[in-house]
Structure formats: C-alpha cells, structure tokens
Image (cartoon, grey):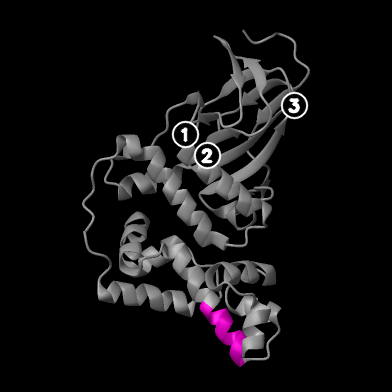
Amino acid sequence: MIPRASRAVAHDRAAPSTNGRRRAADNGPMSDTDLRIELRQTPAGIVGYEPLPEHRIKLHVGAPVAGACQFHRFLYTRGDLDIVPAGVSDVWHEEAASTSLMLRVSTALLRRTADEMGLPAECATLAQRHQFRDAHIEHIAWALDAERRAGFPNGTLYADSLGTALAVHLLSGQRRPEPVPARGLTRPQLRRVTEHIEAHLDGDLSLSSLADVAGLSASHLKTLFKRSTGLPVHEYVVHRRVDRARGLLLRSELPASQVALESGFSHQSHMARCMRRVLGVTPGEVRRAG
C-alpha cells in the first residue's frame, strides 16, 4: 500500500499555457508536433499523474527504484515502461528519486494513424500498463532523446517519422491488414514528391506535407517511397542536402556556415556530421578538392 506520509509529491500536470497554447520545455521544433519528449527528475515520494488530454509513456532510465501502489510493491529498473492513457489519472509511491524519459503522444496522432491503418475510431486508444518491456518503444524514446540533446538538428520531418512509427507500433495489436501496393510510388507521384523536396530542401520538410503532395497517407508514403528509392524519406532528404552542400562548396565562395543553412542543415556541425556519414569526407576536404 502507498505510505500515508511522504517526503515529496510530484505531479504530472498540463504545462502552463502561453497565448492559449501549451508550452513544451526543451522540445525545440517538436513543441508543436504530435510527439514530444522530456527528461524528468522525480523526487522520492508520491508520484501523481493527473488526467491529461494526451497519452503518456514513461521510460525508466535511472538507477533501480523501489516503490508501491495500492495493490503491490515493485522495483523499477532501467528499461521499464509505463503507459498512462489520455484522461486517466494514476498515483504510486517511489522510495528514492527517479529519472525517466517521458513521451507525450497526442490523441490526434493515434486517431489519424488508426484511420490510415483502416482501424475503426474506437481502436485509437491505449490501455493502461505498468512495468513492461518493449524494445521498439525504447529505441524510439532514445532516438528522440538523442535528437533533444543535440538541439533537434533534424527538424520536423525526423520527429514526424518517429511519431508515425511509434503510433503504428502502439496500434499494431489491433491492426487489420491494409492493402499496400506491392509496387512503389507511381512515376508522377515520385516526381511530385522529389520536386517538392528539392524546392523546399532548405526548409523544415514534414512527412505530412510530402504525403499530401503524393496524395497518400503518411504511413503509405513511408513504405512506397522506400520501395521506389531504396531509402527512407528522411535519409533521402539527408542525401539530397549533402549533395546540394557539396555542390555549393565546390562552386561558390560561400562560408561553410551559409552553405549549411542554404542546404537545409540546422548548423555547420550538423552538415559536417551528415557529410562524413554519407560521403566519408569533411566539408573542408570537399572545398579543397574543388
């Protein structure tokens, strides 16, 4: 049972609003998307989750922490997950301070993904679960955290892709097979999408905008685009940005920082990392080769 006395009470509430919109601390370009992440340091004591209009997925990433809820005692270890669905409250007691990654998933994302999967609206829900393991969810959480710690260099498109992957995985237990063409995109679809990418390469591309251009759902676009090009959408965009940066470095006198921005990279070091990964050389080596 939860102890009557506690050293601290930690509540998970809706973030304060600014001009009618919720604030998401330290979420960069993900603040206004369907999937957000935050690192939480919770003091020992009672942990209270108030009902919120979003789903919460908590990944324990710190040292082991013992605790108790109304019916049993437990020991959180690194990798343990909890799901608190939208509109649900929860409370338990933790005997020591804990560290976790909190994923906040909008109900709109699940509804939209369920519709794209051919599921009825009532399937766009999550069940409350505690202390379970899921390597796929954990992988996405760490990928988002790496993006957060790097300052969100990959922008909205990367967050959209991870959000869609997470939503599909969360709903996969209720999935009804949806016919997906064995072929890839049609030639007109592929041309429209790639031309849109080229025209907006220096901007913050999103999976939803590319899906609209193709006339497909986001999940179908991800599948068919990879079949057509051999690359995931995000990776294709990275390759095109690297190619544009290479051309600018060879043919212009622009400083590397300006080349990075005009190629769609968030900053010069982001361009350098991607260029080393794709081409195996640094921007300086490319420029000297010209």
- Closer mark to the observer between disc 3 and disc 2: 2
Q: Which residue is mark 2?
A: 138
Q: Position of residue 46 (x, y in %)?
A: 69, 19
| Disc 3 crowd, CA 10 A, few/some/many (<14, 14-19, 20+) | some
- Give how far apart the Cα atoms at labels 3 and 2 are: 23 Å
Q: Quadrant of the N terminus?
A: top right
**Residue placed farthest to the right in the image?**
7
The residue at 37%/57% (across/down) is 218
Image vertical order of residue 40 relative to residue 242, above or below: above
Q: Main secondary structure of the magenta part?
A: helix
Q: Position of residue 36 (x, y in %)?
A: 57, 47
Residues shaded magenta = 243-251
Mark 2 touches mark 1? (CB < 8 Å): yes
Give the mark nearer the N terminus: 3 vs 2.
3
Note whether residue 227 is visible: yes
Residue type at tag 3:
Pro
Q: Which residue is mark 1?
A: 134
Give the mark nearer the N terminus: 3 vs 1.
3
Q: Secondary structure at mark 3?
A: loop
Looking at the rendered structure, which numbered label has been put on residue 112?
none
Residue type at tag 1:
Asp
- Closer mark to the observer between disc 3 and disc 1: 1
The residue at 65%/85% (across/down) is 287
Q: Secondary structure at mark 2?
A: helix
Q: Secondary structure at mark 1?
A: loop
Q: Position of residue 290 (x, y in %)?
A: 62, 90
Relative horizontal placement of residue 134, taking residue 191 as reference (left or right):
right
- Give how far apart the Cα atoms at labels 2 and 1 are: 6 Å
In which image quadrant can residue 89 be found?
top right
Q: Position of residue 58 (x, y in %)?
A: 57, 33
Q: Which residue is mark 3?
A: 43
- Give how far apart the Cα atoms at labels 3 and 1 are: 25 Å
